[in-house]
Amino acid sequence: MARPLNEIKAQMTTAFIENETVQQLYELAPGQSFEDQFSLVSIESILFDSVAFAVWVLESLFDVFRQEIQEKIDASKPFTLKWYKAVALAYQHGFSIDEDGDYINGSATEEQIKASKIVTQVAFEKAIIQGHGVLRCKTAKDQGGELVKLTPQELEGFDYYMNKKTAFGLRVVSISREHDRLQLSLKIWYDPQILDSQGRRKDGTNDTPVIDAINDYLRNIEFNGSFVKTYLTDALQQVPGVKIPKIISAESSWSSFTQNMESSLSAGLIEEIRSTFAGYMRLDVDNSTFEYVPYG
């Protein structure tokens, strides 16, 4: 781990003032520190600052290098979670693979290979299907800055690839679903100096600051993570002009939205925490309600 700048400088300046030749040349008083005898703006202090910064940069680069090497070592250990994730993200749609699951793409350009890596999010779970243990892989791709499900053709190719790469005797079940839908009923007490009765900024810069904050929160949920009502409330409190955000109700579903859907781990009314079924979630604006009340 890179040492702090002041520690690096202190080690150099201590050795500097303890050198007998330096003591004679500068007529240094014994027992006093470097700072006691040299101004912070002296050429000596500036030189030590510069060298200390260079040493700190070098040590920081070593830290990054060490971390990258460790990540590569971890990812290279076969059949670990990190290995499976690295393999899944390396999927190249449209290229053939050999019997070992390695790509036959020697004539492809870097741009073609990069474009073929369509999978951007994956999560693995152990599951039992028809009495057999399997490894279930949820996956999604990026499209215009939003996560979307893979097409049937893409999912078929991905599943074939993963089962070529997995351990002998272990089956991977690949899944790519449409986003979970979040329906909210919100009551927002707002500052009339900043927002109007429809939640729009009065300076005209944003007509949907509350909805934007909800979408930002949902995008930042870890893939295959959980929606948390309290965390959404915290995010809404950061919106300029929002005084008190109150979540009257929150529901989610993973198909067409149903008001009376039976509550389960991945659908229905949300008490506080809801695990995502598809791995990611979006706001169902059309089926959400927003009540704005002036504060004060």
Image (tube, rainbow, N blue to C red):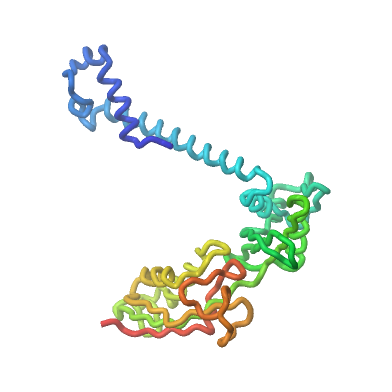
**110 or 9, which lies in front?**
9
User: Could you tell me how many numbered marks the image carries?
Assistant: 0
For residue 170, side relative to residue 240 (left or right): right
Q: Can residue 19 be seen in this view?
A: yes
**21 or 67, which lies in front?**
67
Q: Which residue is farthest left?
A: 29
Q: Position of residue 171 (x, y in %)?
A: 75, 58
**136 or 246, which lies in front?**
136
Above or below, 227 relative to 92: below
Q: Which residue is farthest right?
A: 99
Residue at 37% in and 84% down? 292
For residue 127, side relative to residue 18 (left or right): right
Above or below, 186 relative to 45: below
Q: Where is residue 264 in the image (x, y as percent from the top left)?
A: 57, 77
Snapshot quadrant of residue 123 = bottom right
Above or below, 14 relative to 111: above
Snapshot quadrant of residue 32 = top left
Task: Please identify the quadrant where the N terminus is shown.
Answer: top left
For residue 172, side relative to residue 86 (left or right): right
Residue at 60% in and 72% down? 179
Snapshot quadrant of residue 294 = bottom left
Q: Is residue 122 visible?
A: no
For residue 51, side relative to residue 86 (left or right): left
Q: Where is residue 291 in the image (x, y as percent from the top left)?
A: 40, 85
Residue at 56% in and 87% down? 259
Task: Please identify the quadrant where the C terminus is shown.
Answer: bottom left
Residue at 37% in and 77% down? 245
Q: Which residue is farthest bottom?
A: 260
Q: Where is residue 105 in the image (x, y as percent from the top left)?
A: 78, 47
